[in-house]
Image (cartoon, rainbow, N blue to C red):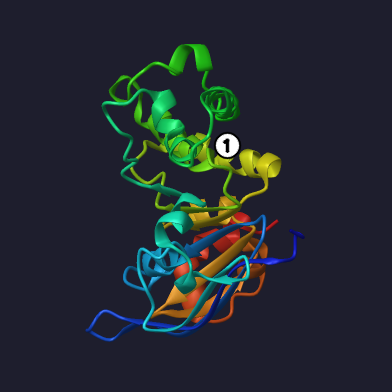
Amino acid sequence: MSDHAAAVEFKQVSKNYGSGYVLQNFDLIIQSGKIVTIIGPSGCGKTTLLKMINRLIEPEDGTVLVEGKNVSGLDPVELRRDIGYVIQQIGLFPHMTIEQNISIVPRLKGEKKKALLARTEELLQLIGLSPEQFRSRYPHELSGGQQQRIGVARALAANPSIILMDEPFSALDPISRIQLQKELINLNERVKKTIVFVTHDIDEALKIADQIVLLKDGQIIQTGSPAELLDKPANDFVREFLGVERFNQYSI
């Protein structure tokens, strides 16, 4: 797939939970191989948007395309196995070793034991944890930051081209969080996935994103690189949401 192909596309998508539209006639193109952060006030549709990509939420109207295919025509279980998913509550299986946790999706897809072992080793090295030391441990023996790294490794295990991340680092202490943000940027320079990352932390969004999508009331107020939003905010809402101090802080 070329760098400029759309990994995900929303076409005229609407979603109403009964108390009004969360998204209405929503259009968005997410380019392949980029880290795209979705930010905006609470209730603006960030998580809804994310969960529509892997069909955890279905739209009332419109089309969601993943790599050119309409997701409504795809088997939701297969679709979810082909898309990495990392959430705040990491959801590692407590009774399984780290190796079993990481390899669960490729195992379900029928990969051979030898390939699973090699993949687990490769991923542990990729996220900076020694395979010898961590492979046989259980989740409770790991720190929060280490568990979150395993969550990222598990999302990468089936080699998906798209990974969804919903506030993945927000429960971590500031030092682990900054470390994982850096690692995510470095990781994506190597593995070139499309990462759709929901966060309410504006500094996190500015730091990790190739593209930022700023939502309000289910509409895109502005989208662009962090530099574009800081150099040319579309309106007062963008300026206020990003915060005056950031314009000073990030200006060169």
Q: Quadrant of the C terminus?
A: bottom right
Q: Quadrant of the N terminus?
A: bottom right
Q: Residue at x 50, y 12 (%)?
A: 132
x, y percent for residue 203: 50, 53
Q: Within 10 angstroms of label 1, few (less than 14), some, or many (20 or more) residues?
A: some
* Viewer-proximal residue among 249 and 222: 222
* Viewer-proximal residue among 181 and 250: 181
Rendering quarter of residue 209: bottom right
Q: Is residue 184 visible?
A: yes
Name the residue that disc number 1 marks: 183
Disc 1 residue type (three-letter): Glu
x, y percent for residue 244: 51, 66
Q: Say which element carries label 1.
A: helix
Rendered position, 27 above or below 205? below
Q: Which residue sits furthest left?
A: 19
Q: From the viewer's perspective, is 242 left or right of 46?
A: right
* Viewer-proximal residue among 7 and 174: 7
Q: From the viewer's perspective, is 10 left or right of 173?
A: right
